[in-house]
Amino acid sequence: MGRARLLLLPFSILYWLGVVVRNWFFDIGILKIENIGVPVISIGNLSTGGVGKTPFVEMLIERLIANCKLSVVSRGYGRKTAGTVVVSDGHGRIESVENSGDEPSQLAQKYPALIVIADEKRVSGTRKAMELGAKLILLDDGFQHRYLHRDLNLVLMTAEEILDGDFLLPAGNRREPVCSLERADLVVISRCKDIKEYESVCVLGRKRNLFPTDMLTIGLQTKLKSFKRPWSSEIVESKNFTGKKVIAFSGIGNPKPFEDILTKADVILAKHIVFADHHWYTERDIDTVVQAKKEYSADYIVTTEKDVARLKSIFGKFLKSESVYFAEIQQEVIAGDDVLNAAIQKFVN
């Protein structure tokens, strides 16, 4: 932690007090939790920043969507609207990325049969999903949104987060203290290097009382699925990138795992231009990327799937004319696959 953030520790204490009081109000019933009438699986995290939540949500979608009418309800971070937005009614995307946010737009594009709703008020968003026929709700980034009852609480923490520890906002990145994990049904440990690291993280997490000794856990490893052309979604084998010089750019919560993915693909990462999470790109930003490609004599420009979702509607010419690709990533369960399946399959008719 930087020295400047250490100075914010007194404010983290005030933040902690606010979180504790808010959760207590929910626990004793002053703040009401509404049971909406269909099963709700919440996928959330303790900390801000990228923990690999979106590819994990995609993995759940792929395991569930064939067996029920499924919906994802999300806040739609970074969107230019407020209120309830139907991103997809279960027959393909019907709303722009500007109005829906990058993650809901990405999910609606990839899974046409998925009902996708963006709404900062998750109860009203879930009601809209039910009107459209949803029988099972995946509540994206839902751990802190306690107004909506959930039947399964999945919480993601990175292996690094458990190993290194952290403070509450604003001195650190945690939205809630680790004692809040008592509300979780399953802790999903993401970004594990291998099964050995997963096992050591589990031991350390229990030793430090980060989660109860009887808490169910699973381990995830983030892997490159493929490189794709953003306009045609044509798959390009990763071996074609081996030894090639690449300019990367991204506007995501945690850019380091994206860099790690590229490094493991044996590309030469000449420069990574980092923008803020959910950044809306401008002509100047695109010029910066193009100039960097020329300056470093790079072979390709590579970005993330989320960034492509924001770029397509405005900078289609850039995506078509430059050698732009995106890295499609996936989560692989390296431990506890049977535990995860047992937890989610009971909600499928």
Image (tube, grey):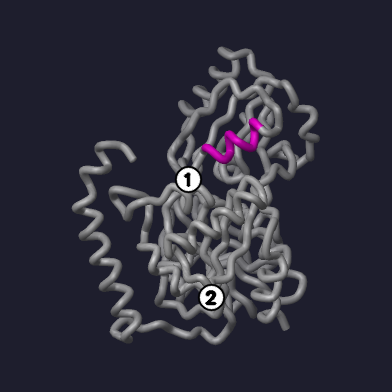
Q: What amino acid type is highlighted by mark number 1? A: Gly
Question: 287 or 182, which lies in front?
Answer: 182
Q: Residue at x 61, y 60 (%)?
A: 57
Q: Secondary structure at mark 1?
A: loop
Q: Is residue 179 above or below residue 10?
A: below
Q: Is residue 19 above or below residue 164?
A: below
Q: Earlier in the sequence, mark 2 or mark 1?
A: 2
Q: Is residue 262 magenta?
A: yes
Residue 172: x %, y % from top left: 33, 49
Residue 284: x %, y % from top left: 46, 26
Q: Quadrant of residue 86?
A: bottom right
Circle on res. 128: 2
Question: 303 or 97, which lies in front?
Answer: 303
Q: What amino acid type is highlighted by mark number 2? A: Lys
Q: Residue at x 33, y 52 (%)?
A: 167
Q: Tell me the residue that label 1 is attached to.
A: 253
Residue 82: x %, y % from top left: 41, 61
Q: Is residue 282 left or right of residue 16?
A: right
State the quadrant of the N terminus: top left
- Residues in magenta, as a range: 256-263
Q: Nearer the viewer, mark 2 or mark 1?
A: 1
On the question of residue 317 being in view, the answer is: no
